[in-house]
Amino acid sequence: MTLVKVHDKQFHPYLTQTMIHDKLQETAAAINADYAGKRPLFIAVLNGSFMFASDLFKYLTIDAEICFIKLASYKGTKSTGHVITAIGLDTDITGRDIIVLEDIIDTGKTLSQFLPQLINQQPASLKIAVLLHKPEATVYPVHIDYCCFSIPNKFVVGYGLDYDGLGRNLPEIYQLHE
């Protein structure tokens, strides 16, 4: 097993590129079927979802638009419990079909605070697509419509997810080695 070091911690391979892309194709197929004849707007939550959003979009065959927002609640390997909106939504979503793209949902706090802001703008529909979900860590339940992977409550990096800014560029997902 090849370990990678990010800052002061060691991580072992967890989800391979092949596993990730197979799930992305499956998820895109479901979205393509659900939104046939429609033009949804995807809202990708930065920074972590940039790889997920980019690769998922490559498998979409429907007409779709994308915009980006920046929400943050992590410092180190733990959620701070405070959600910060660093870059806000600058697109009118009234009457639009919206799909929020999130890299990971663990406690659910980030989306539980952000979703009411979207609902207040009266979209036609609002769904959530997530790369990773940690059901054991969920404190604020959020309905997930498209989930690529449910994972244990262990810290992960790679494929857009970071540990204090580093590790996002890893092409696979690595789990904290204990």
Image (tube, grey):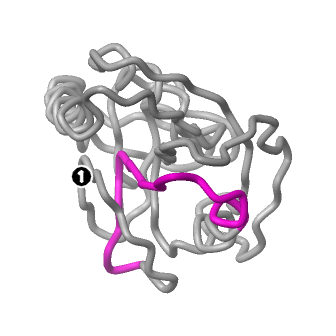
- Please give the range of residues in magenta: 117-137
Q: Residues within 10 Å of mark 1 (few under 14, many from 20)?
A: some
Identified at 14% across, 28% down, the residue is 22
Query: Total label count?
Result: 1
Instruction: Identify the image quadrant of the C terminus.
Output: bottom left
Q: Position of residue 63 (x, y in %)?
A: 40, 17
Q: Position of residue 62 (x, y in %)?
A: 32, 20
Q: Is residue 31 above or below residue 107?
A: above
Q: Position of residue 48 (x, y in %)?
A: 57, 40
Please identify the residue farthest to the bottom as the structure is shown: 139
Residue 6 seen in render: no
In depth, the one of 23 and 61 nearer the eye is: 61
Circle 1 SS class: strand
Identified at 35% across, 63% down, the residue is 144
Q: Horizontally, is 98 left or right of 28 in the view?
A: right
Q: Quadrant of residue 70?
A: top right
Type of residue at label 1? Phe
Q: Horizontally, is 55 left or right of 101 in the view?
A: left
Q: Is residue 58 above or below residue 125?
A: above
Residue under circle 1?
149
Residue 162 seen in render: yes
Q: Position of residue 15 (x, y in %)?
A: 23, 39
Q: Is residue 160 above or below residue 58?
A: below
Q: Is residue 84 above or below residue 78?
A: above
Q: Quadrant of residue 112?
A: bottom right
